Amino acid sequence: MEAVLECCCGLDVHRDTVVACILKGPLKGKPESMIKTFSAMPDGLKELRLWLESQSCRFAAMESTGVYWQPVYNELETAFDGSMVLLLVNARHMKNVPGRKTDIKDAEWIAQLLRAGLLKGSFIPAKPTRELKELTRYRKSLVEESSAQKNRIEKLLQGAGIKLSTFLSDVFGISGRNILEYLSLHGEFPAHLLKDFLKGRLKAKEDDVKRALQSKLSPHQQKLLQMQLRHLYQIEDNIGMLEAEIECKLRLFSEQLKLIASIPGINLNAAAAIIGEIGTDLSPFPDAEHFTSWAGLSPGNHESAGKKSPPVSPKAIAISKGSFVKLPGLSPECVKHLCPAGTGKSGSGEDHKKP
């Protein structure tokens, strides 16, 4: 392989260790190979950075191994005052010869491919964007967990014969929560107190709600409801803290946030999640087609022997796709445009059924 770099480093990253191989030498000659193993602890990663700087190695590449690459990337992106070229490469793009797999040989192989200019780095947004992404993804998980917890509470009420959801469109509105709190403390709801608990238009449904509250909770169900409500409130408190932190992070992207939110069908929550996934600099993508392909939103050709098979998206791309088509505040019209016919998925994430 013809060399294009005089000095570069291949990194084989694991949970506890990082194997580094530096290839250094003239382009036309055989390079000198230097191999060292470092601890994946913070002091070991700092030692790795100092070693690369002492060898004037400004180019490095590593596999995208789970989450283990992240602390390595965070440490090395500051090397040479932030001017180091660091590539995170999909493992499928640099498989070694079968039967010759060791940590040292993996690091050497990565270094050889990098020296020959055969590696293409994955898209890694700037650190503020990565931090925003972690917050928005965690918020999405907590919102889903909150919905699941509400379903558990509804299942408990139905099992006890309490049919609040028949007459309350939102069991977890102000009136519904007050009633649930009383039930969790006393196990039953006196009919003469109901008038003080109902708010707004629910006052017109007082007789219906009384019928729904005729059943009693057993001591077991009462304790279970207390625990479930306490867990729900904790999740909602965490969502509130997350949203406050997200708001602080978004101050760096105020103009871009307004621009994205101006698109019909996308509110501020969806705009924040989009910025968290892709950042504000799309220059790494040559065109819109490359971007939609990276996000897993464009159809592909998977045909063999005249038969077409559905594409299997890589895990990282599937996460991005899920972030785009399941954003909070995304209208059905936007989901329809994000998942056109041919992608194999609908906006809800369900497979299209064959006729």
Image (cartoon, grey):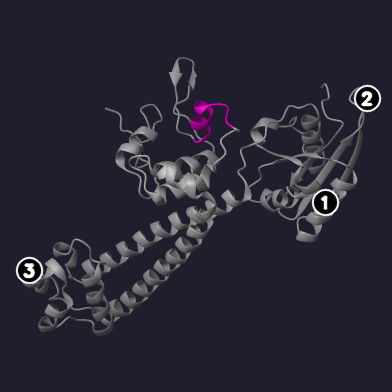
Q: Nearer the viewer, mark 3 or mark 1?
A: 3
| Distance from the alpha carbon under mark 3 to that under mark 1 | 71 Å
| Distance from the alpha carbon under mark 2 to that under mark 1 | 26 Å
In the picture provided, is 70 more to the left or to the right than 326?
Answer: right
SS class of the residue under badge 3? helix
Q: Give the residue type that dot 1 points to.
A: Leu
In the picture provided, is 3 more to the left or to the right than 226?
Answer: right
Q: Which residues are magenta?
A: 285-295
Residue 29 disc label: 2
Q: Give the residue type that dot 2 points to.
A: Gly
**Image-quadrant location for residue 10:** top right
SS class of the residue under badge 1? helix
Disc 3 target residue:
204
In the picture provided, is 276 more to the left or to the right than 350?
Answer: right
Which x, y percent locates residue 256? 48, 44
Which x, y percent locates residue 134? 54, 54
**Image-quadrant location for residue 171:** bottom left
- Say if mark 3 contacts mark 1, CB within 8 Å: no
Residue closer to the observer: 349 or 119: 119
Compared with 68, 208 (above or below) is: below
Disc 1 target residue:
48
